[in-house]
Image (tube, helix red, strand yellow):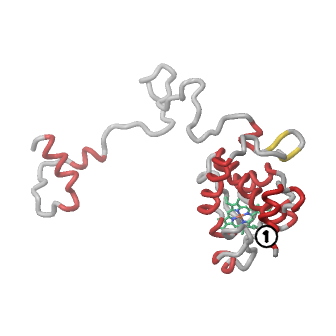
Amino acid sequence: MSRRAVLVALALGPFAAGCDDEGVDFERMIHQFRYDPYEPSQFFSDGKIMRDPPRGTVHRDQVIGPPELVTGLEEGGYLSYVPIPVDRALLTRGENRFRIFCATCHGELGNGVSQVAENMRLRPPPSLHEERLRNYPAGRLYRVIEQGYGLMPSYREELEVRDRWAVVAFVQALQLSQHVELAALSPELRKEAQSWLR
Ligand code: HEC
């Protein structure tokens, strides 16, 4: 059988019942010569079969960057500010990620009202407007996203560094939206807010 025919026979394997595969030595492929991990070998001059990564290689999962940006910590504790420029684009991104990854449990408004919260009797996701959480420095919110907290899983894999900060900025905006002092608003916004209060 030609090489091509063998490949086709292998690819069709499970579907090819009745096909004539006599003469194909599958055993030989299963038991071909190979090295196991950590096995010694004369092939390379250092006697190891496993290769070291080239010097300076950075693992693709390893996040590099300024420590405060990556960890949310600075000397003496949590970072008190979002370490990237907070503009509309960042907040929009944060809102988008929040609605996908956080609102399912903490609610669209961050008030802890969600179907999941109703079903999580043990320790439901808290309202992010609780005074305790409103007082969290930015770095602490970042850590909760990055590391997880108690029953809440980490969102490190789903949200890369910039997205985590975008969510932090959005959560802070959400918190402000429910608790800002009227006096702190610009005259136009104050007028708008007062029209809702009536
Ligand atoms: C699967 C449901 C779920 C999702 C999704 C979720 N959380 Fe949570 N979160 C929880 C639960 C449950 C707790 C309370 C954990 C505990 O006390 O053990 C919590 C706690 C928190 C806290 C308070 C931590 C503290 O120190 O008390 C913050 C802040 C928070 N979550 C933010 C977020 C953000 C931001 C996201 C989106 C990236 C998110 N959560 C996604 C379930 C969730």
Asked if disc 1 is less than 8 Å from ligand 1, the answer is no
Vertical comparison of 58 with 12: above or below = above
Residue 78 is situated, as x and y percent measured from the top left of the image, at 84, 47
Judge the density around disc 1: few (<14), some (14-19), many (≥20) Cα neighbours within 10 Å: few
User: Residue lying furthest top in this view?
Assistant: 45
Q: Residue at x 15, y 42 (%)?
A: 4
Ligand 1 lies in which image quarter?
Answer: bottom right
Where is residue 14 shown, x and y percent of the image? 22, 61
Amino acid on which disc 1 is placed: Ser
Is residue 44 placed above or below 140 in the rendered structure?
above
Image: 6 above or below 52:
below
**Residue 152 position (above or below residue 53):** below
Q: Residue at (64%, 39%) from the top-left corner?
A: 63
Q: How many marks?
A: 1
Would you identify the image quadrant in which residue 33 lies?
top left
Residue 176, x across and y down, in percent: 80, 60
Give percent across and percent down for residue 138. Answer: 79, 50
Residue 58 located left or right of residue 122: left
Secondary structure at badge 1 equals helix
On-image quarter of the C terminus: bottom right
Q: Nearer the viewer, residue 22 or 108?
A: 108
Residue beneath disc 1? 195
Give the quadrant of residue 85: top right
Quarter in which the N terminus is drawn: top left
Residue at position x 45%, y 22% from top? Answer: 44
Asked whether, in this view, residue 9 is left or right of residue 58, the answer is: left
